[in-house]
Image: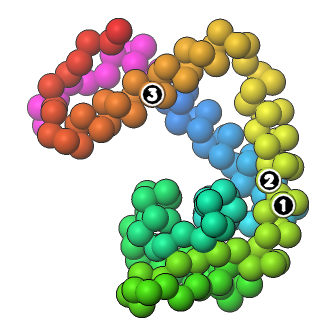
């Protein structure tokens, strides 16, 4: 059996509760996007990033960074979105690094989906928690992300919780 630090019963309970919470929330949000707007979570992620881009367009490497996807996954997904006329390729001075922007159909779709999605997030998440919990939740998310960043930079030593 591999060496390692096993989770305590409390940690195991917390981890499984988190996984169940994440799955249920993700599923509820994705079902809403799919049923009401014909969008997947991946579609929505790409479209929100493009809609919020300063000039309405992003290069492939910027979308890779924003989505945290592999290049091939992004490429395949953008092709599917192009076929559905949600995004279009925009030429750049570097032909090897195209940019993408929303089509008119994509702009209309995200303009309708975003407020409904925000309302659903509010109803399912923010309305269920109090402001003190939200502050602790933000701290926890930022702490875990900082730990992931440290680990990915080669720091594998455990750090004490604040």
Residue 43 seen in render: no
Q: Position of residue 126 (x, y in %)?
A: 75, 27
Residue 128 seen in render: yes
Q: Position of residue 79 (x, y in %)?
A: 58, 85
| Number of marks in picture | 3
Instruction: State yes or no: residue 7 in magenta.
Output: yes
- Residue 130 falls left or right of residue 7: right
The 10 Å Cα crowd at callout 2, few under 14, some 14 to 19, many 20 or more, is some
- Residue 131 falls left or right of residue 99: right
Q: Earlier in the sequence, mark 3 or mark 2?
A: 2
Q: Which residue is mark 2?
A: 114
Where does the magenta region start and end?
A: 1-14
Q: In what element is the residue under mark 3?
A: helix
Checking the image for residue 50, the label placed there is none
Q: Position of residue 104 (x, y in %)?
A: 81, 78
Instruction: State yes or no: residue 2 in magenta.
Output: yes
**Residue located 70% across and 74% down the image:** 102
Q: Which residue is mark 3?
A: 142
**Residue located 64% across and 18% down the image:** 134
Q: Which residue is mark 1?
A: 111
Identify whether 60 is placed above or below 141. below
- Residue 104 falls left or right of residue 17: right
**Residue located 67% across and 79% down the image:** 87
Q: Earlier in the sequence, mark 1 or mark 3?
A: 1
Quadrant, the N terminus = top left
Q: In what element is the residue under mark 2?
A: helix
The 10 Å Cα crowd at callout 1, few under 14, some 14 to 19, many 20 or more, is some
Q: Position of residue 3 (x, y in %)?
A: 12, 32
Q: In what element is the residue under mark 1?
A: helix
Are the residues at dot 2 and dot 1 in contact (C-beta closer than 8 Å)? yes
Front residue of this view, candidates 149 and 99: 99
């Amino acid at each position: 059996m591999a060496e390692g630090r096993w989770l305590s019963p409390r940690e195991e309970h917390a981890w499984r509760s988190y996984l169940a919470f994440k799955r249920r929330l993700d599923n509820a949000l994705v079902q809403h996007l799919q049923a009401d707007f014909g969008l997947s979570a991946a579609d929505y992620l790409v479209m929100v990033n493009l809609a919020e881009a300063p000039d309405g367009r992003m290069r492939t490497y910027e979308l890779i960074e924003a989505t945290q996807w592999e290049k091939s996954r992004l490429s395949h997904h953008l092709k599917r979105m192009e076929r559905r006329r949600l995004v279009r390729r925009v030429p750049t001075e570097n032909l090897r690094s195209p940019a993408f922007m929303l089509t008119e159909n994509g702009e209309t779709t995200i303009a309708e989906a975003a407020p409904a999605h925000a309302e659903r997030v509010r109803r399912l998440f923010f309305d269920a928690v109090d402001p003190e919990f939200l502050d602790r939740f933000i701290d926890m998310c930022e702490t875990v992300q900082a730990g992931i960043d440290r680990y990915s930079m080669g720091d594998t030593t455990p750090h004490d919780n604040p």
